[in-house]
Image: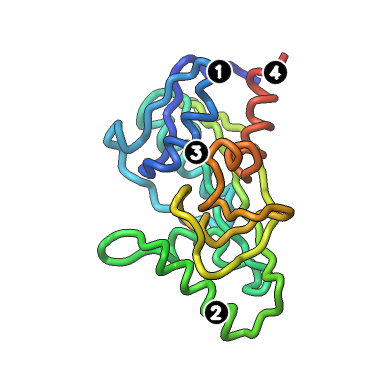
Amino acid sequence: MRALGDTLVIATHNAGKLREIGALLAPYGIAVTSAGELGLEEPEETEETFAGNARIKAHHAARESGLPALSDDSGIEVDALDGQPGVHTADWAETPAGRDFPMAMEKVWQRLEEKGAPEPRTARFRCTLCVAWPDGEDALFEGKVEGRVVWPMRGDRGFGFDPVFLPAGETETFGEMDPAKKHGMSHRADAFRKFVAAFFDG
């Protein structure tokens, strides 16, 4: 795998995601900046897969910044909702005033209630990381964590759908869990282990 260099652009405008990815990269001496901090526009995500949208974001940031860029496209798939919201996870939170994830979580729960979905209401978080270089080369790494959707929302740690996601075998939602524990077992951590193995191990 080709070298990353010492600065990586994280293709996000989400402060929570930048913080989480920055913490995962810190041990490897990689400095991070974000597309938001560089004033880059957010490209339109037009694909119907996590990999497709991750590629759009990473290539846009690499091209515009002239640096290698790392993007993450992630979301929650709820089995009783045929995998929704999936790649549209953030879209379910969109409002004219910005993203409202408590509203989005309520929407998911209401749909499960309307369907009379049996317990456990299984779900998973998926994450696809894409590293892209300014010359157009890229590499993909995919991760997931299984669990179920619970209600009411629990915890004010994490972000997105974390307060309603209970990982398999755990008693705390991602919203309640110590961030260090979550970082060790999340879908993003799973994808990052593969990313680290490719770039830093050996």
Say which of marks 2 and 3 sits in front: 2
Q: Residue at x 55, y 32 (%)?
A: 131
Residue 201's tag is 4
Q: Position of residue 161 (x, y in %)?
A: 50, 58
- Please tell me how crowded label 4 is: few (under 14), some (14-19), or many (20+) other residues with Cα within 10 Å: few
Is 57 placed left or right of 87 in the picture? left
Q: Position of residue 162 (x, y in %)?
A: 52, 55
Name the residue carrying label 2: 111
Residue 71's tag is 3
For mark 2, give the secondary structure.
helix
Instruction: Return the residue nearer the eye: 153 or 87.
Output: 153
Q: In 3D space, how far apart are the residues under numbered discs 4 and 3 (Cα atoms)?
A: 21 Å
Say if mark 4 contacts mark 2, CB within 8 Å: no
For mark 4, give the secondary structure.
loop
- Please tell me how crowded label 2 is: few (under 14), some (14-19), or many (20+) other residues with Cα within 10 Å: few
Is 4 placed left or right of 123 in the picture? left
- Return the disc, 1 or 2, that comes first in the chain's sequence: 1
Q: Hey, what amino acid is under mark 4?
A: Asp
- Return the disc, 4 or 1, that comes first in the chain's sequence: 1
Q: Hey, what amino acid is under mark 1?
A: Tyr
For mark 1, give the secondary structure.
helix
- Quadrant placement of the N terminus: top right
Q: Hey, what amino acid is under mark 3?
A: Ser
- Return the disc, 4 or 2, that comes first in the chain's sequence: 2
Q: Position of residue 88 (x, y in %)?
A: 50, 62
